[in-house]
Image (cartoon, rainbow, N blue to C red):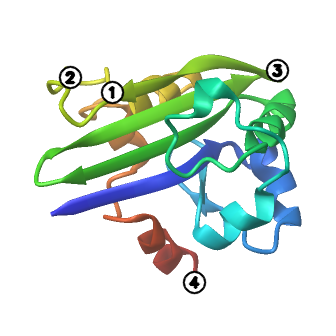
């Protein structure tokens, strides 16, 4: 079974500026966080003419210049960009976090051929920790906020409607 996620995670306040984008949809997660799924239409809308920051080259769906947007949003609080793609138990993850206008974490990459990590060590869980999430009684922070509720990025829109 496949799992695919491309998105931005932050508080409602941090993601408030995304409301200016026609293709932005913000969906509640747990722990007071929200997900902005990165669809093809949204990627085209937020794309700037800036060159891609070399640190973000491994990001599969990261629009050129979007790092400046996330740096601006992070003035209100930390914001994370996340990617995950799995099929049949193997796959990859990537996460980066901006805070106070700076890239403060990552991008952290777990390549497809990397060995499985211990609970809470995945790139997305590390990013969620930077956003204040604690695993609590869950397997990890990924599980705690409910990122496993849908198998692909588009599945989140079913919740929004």
The answer for how far apart the CA atoms under marks 1 and 3 are is 23 Å
Indicate which disc, 1 or 2, sits on the residue closer to the N terminus.
Answer: 2
Q: Is residue 18 left or right of residue 104?
A: right
Q: Are marks 2 and 4 in contact (CB under 8 Å)?
A: no
For the residue carrying disc 3, how many other residues have a C-alpha within 10 Å: few (<14), some (14-19), or many (20+)? some
The answer for how far apart the CA atoms under marks 3 and 2 are is 29 Å
Secondary structure under the numbered disc 4 in the rendered image? loop
The answer for how far apart the CA atoms under marks 4 and 1 are is 30 Å
Tag nearer the camera, 4 or 3 = 3
* Residue name at image x 83 percent, y 63 percent: 19
Query: Where does label 3 land, which residue?
Result: 100
Question: Residue 135 placed where, x, y %?
Answer: 36, 28
For the residue carrying disc 4, how many other residues have a C-alpha within 10 Å: few (<14), some (14-19), or many (20+)? few
Query: Where does label 1 land, which residue?
Result: 122
Indicate which disc, 1 or 3, sits on the residue closer to the N terminus.
Answer: 3
Indicate which disc, 4 or 3, sits on the residue closer to the N terminus.
Answer: 3
Image quadrant where residue 27 sits: bottom right
Q: Can the viewer see residue 33 in this picture?
A: no
The answer for how far apart the CA atoms under marks 2 and 4 are is 35 Å
Indicate which disc, 3 or 2, sits on the residue closer to the N terminus.
Answer: 3
Q: Are marks 4 and 1 in contact (CB under 8 Å)?
A: no
Indicate which disc, 2 or 4, sits on the residue closer to the N terminus.
Answer: 2
Secondary structure under the numbered disc 3 in the rendered image? loop
Q: Can the viewer see residue 96 in this picture?
A: yes
The answer for how far apart the CA atoms under marks 1 and 2 are is 6 Å
Q: Are marks 1 and 2 in contact (CB under 8 Å)?
A: yes
Question: Residue 111 placed where, x, y %?
Answer: 29, 31
Query: Where does label 2 land, which residue?
Result: 117
């Amino acid at each position: 079974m496949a799992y695919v996620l491309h998105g931005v995670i932050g508080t409602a306040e941090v993601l408030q500026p995304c409301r200016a984008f026609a293709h932005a949809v913000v969906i509640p997660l747990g722990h007071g966080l929200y997900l902005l799924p990165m669809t093809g239409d949204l990627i085209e809308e937020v794309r700037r003419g800036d060159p891609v920051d070399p640190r973000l080259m491994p990001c599969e769906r990261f629009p050129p210049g979007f790092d400046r947007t996330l740096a601006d949003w992070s003035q209100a609080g930390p914001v994370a960009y996340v990617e995950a793609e799995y099929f049949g138990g193997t796959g990859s993850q990537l996460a980066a976090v901006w805070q106070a206008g700076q890239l403060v974490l990552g991008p952290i990459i777990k390549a497809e051929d990397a060995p499985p990590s211990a609970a809470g060590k995945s790139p997305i869980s590390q990013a969620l920790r930077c956003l204040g999430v604690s695993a609590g009684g869950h397997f990890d922070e990924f599980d705690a906020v409910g990122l496993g509720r849908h198998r692909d990025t588009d599945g989140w829109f079913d919740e929004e409607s």
